Image (spheres, coloured by chain):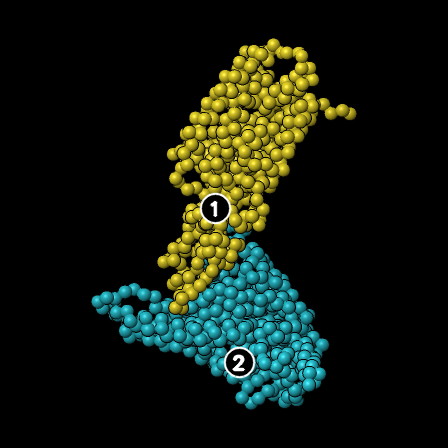
Amino acid sequence: MKRRKFIDSLILTTGGLMILPKCKSPEQGKNSLTSSSNSGTITEPSRVIEILEETDVLVVGGGPSGVTAAISASRAGATTTIVERYNHLGGLWTGGLVLPLLSTHGLNKSKQQEKVIHGIPDEIAQRLKDMGMAIHDVDPVIDPEATKYVLEKMVQEAGIHMLYHCWMSNIVMEDKNIKAVIIESKSGRKAIVPKVVIDCTGDGDVFHLAGEGFEEMKYHIGLVSRLGNIDRIDKTKPGFEEIYVGDPTPLKSVNWFNMHGENDQDGTDLHTLSKLQQQYRIDIWENTEHIRSIPGHEEVFLLDTASQLGVRVSRILDGKYKLTLEDSMTYKSFDDVIGVCGAWTSLLYNTNRIQRNERPLWQIPYRSLVPKHTKNLLVAGRCFSFDKPLVEDARIIGTALLTGHGAGAAAAVAVKSYCAVQDTDVQKIQKVLKDQKAYLG
Amino acid sequence: MRLKAKNIRYFSFVVAVIIALPLPLGIFTGFYIWLSPYVFLNSFLAKTGFTLFNLLGIIFLFLAVYRHRWICRYACPMGVICDTSSKFSKKKKGKFPRLNKSILILALLISLFGLPILSVLDPFYIFNNFFEVLSPEIALLVFLQISGLIVVILLNVIFPHSWCTKICPLGGLQEIVTDIKKSVIHPKKTDQKGMILSRRFLISGLAGLGLGLAFRKLISVPKIKKFRPPGALAEEDFTTTCIRCGNCIKACPTKIIQLSVETSNPFLFLAPEIGFDKSYCLPECTLCGDVCPSNAISKFNFEKKKELFIGTAKINLKNCLLTQNKECDRCKFYCAYNAVQINSKNIKSFPEIDAEKCVGCGACKIVCPEQVIEIVATEVVA
């Protein structure tokens, strides 16, 4: 009996060891639920998967970076597909209720605040403004439902093939190329065969599976919510007290309520995400009850909570170039610039305090979207290649929109010129971007 | 070619000038003060500790034993100034009492009581401090610092060569060393002159004892809590053992160490203190400890720096962005000591300071966009 048990466990362990390198997922062992079986792993039988479609550019994730990437690529002539896990576009910007579009402005060399967000990102902002669904000229706060609508319209106008309700679950690599991307949905497991993949997952799920190097950053995770009937707060009511009820949105009666959360949270850990989701669900309701209990606030109600947790940053790509804080502070000019960003945080630089309105605008080079090894993968959004001290300005909506725009244009050029993203002609990319009214400094 | 003593001294003068200039010299800031055995003996008798650079003072003392007034001949930058200024004197020889040995005895005795205060009469010290004249500030403090050399020059113009031969306590030290050497080699030859001087010795010795005792009585620990450089001795010891040479102020890369203008207590006057108005104490810097010749700031390394408390950060949570649900983590992000935690309760986040880890470096205070952090005196952590 004992010998048989030993052989059994030997087979299971070998099976486990064989599956691990295939998945290229070093995290899997650490995070998997410990099962009662001896080795804690199980071998999934291999199977043949139907190819759903072939496409020039596949954008994984329909958040702010995914949308601008897809629109840019499609407008530049590439057939483009977006894979999105939820039922809307805009990701954390809309469903996540992170409503401010930071940072639209930065200090230029003549010490003037200059608008830096142009091109497709600005087109989105302008449409929202025209609809009365964006407030403030600098760093506008948008209405999430209006933004979902605008993004949907723009994606449809650009002729992008949209796949909602599906989750990228694996990739098939062949000689440093992503041959296929496997998606999971109600229709089962399907493969998409793309010429170029753009990783707009925010967590770098694609480059992680492709075996690219990355830095992990444990940061703050919150859950944003919105309160309604803000305009019905009665300040004349006896016993009225001033209490924080969030910040204004384009809808007069609605405020958005940010949540910061504690530090050192792992945004790629299933247990962390589940635990925080449970806790925040309860906390937000109870906080709203507390607000309603204060005289004058009786009519305030919880309108909604974000459809996803606000993971601020998790994996950060080790790309061909790691953008540094120094680059962002010294007007560093790149030959391969694909976008110009603003900044919104105060910080310590060379031991001096630099205030928000003293922060220079900064350029994003194409190389910071390019992985070191994989030939047909680009990375946009909060997981592109930058140094940790730059995180506050790299992880925000504006930077995501800009990196998406750059990656989309580059993907289209790479497809057209049949070359690896590492060898793509930067001048051609910049020409596409300029044609799409992007600002390159 | 044999190098002449004079040329070596000129060379030394040039080096001394370079070192005294406000340049980023790191651990060599104010380096010449370490060469003086007089400053070393004062600090040593005040029991402030001993560091490697103190060996230089000892080596120079032995060189003075080996050859009479070796330091004057080869090293002292003040010698050049005295010789030059004496040339402007109309008199050929000034009548000035020979005080150098008496000053030395007086200084060392006061030092024994923990007050190396007469280190200010060291020629290296006076020379070094004069270069505060290049300081961009014009203040009484600067004038006090540069006045030493001016007085010396005036003395030499009125009484030529009086400083080096009659007053300088470092010269006195070298003379005593030679006297002792002679009396050891030729014990029978009693010097009549030495007998005469011994009366002065007695007077200065008694005066030293008296002054030392009196100062000890006078010292009262002031209740005002000052932010001293990391590694500074306890407040009472620090203010008395610091010789106000200004090395730490010059060496500090972020210029947060300043001279105190506190006049409420004479022991606080001119003692270096930290002001967190513009910058903070860099976690990777140990310079103030490295350059302190009196060891009022003891030497420390990066590891030890984590336990050297300047103060503690205190956050006014009412105006903190986090408590208003705004995005901010600057205090946490820039804390090199991991002393800030952002915690949350009922969906509200707030930063908390771990008093045992916070050394009061002031980085969070400087970066805070709402300026709601201040550095306060450390409560004694048991």
* Residue B304: percent from left, percent from top: 56, 48
Q: Same chain for marks 2 and 1?
A: no
Separation (CA) of disc 2 from disc 1: 53 Å
Give the letter of the cyan chain: A
Residue at image coords 53%, 54%: B336
Residue B67 is at least partly visible in this image: yes
Residue at image coords 44%, 66%: A260
Q: Which quadrant would residue A202 be assigned to in this image?
A: bottom right
* Residue A423: percent from left, percent from top: 68, 70
Give the residue at the far top of this rendering. B192
Query: Label 2 amino acid?
Result: Glu
Question: Pointer 1: what residue?
Answer: B310
Nearer to me, B62 or A406: B62
Nearer to me, A104 or A388: A388
Chain B as rendered: colour = yellow
- Badge 2: few (under 14), some or many (20 or more) residues near its Cα, within 10 Å? many
In this view, B67 is above or below A113: above
The mark found on residue A84 in the picture is 2
Query: Label 1 amino acid?
Result: Ile
Residue A140 is at least partly visible in this image: no
Numbered disc 2: secondary structure = loop
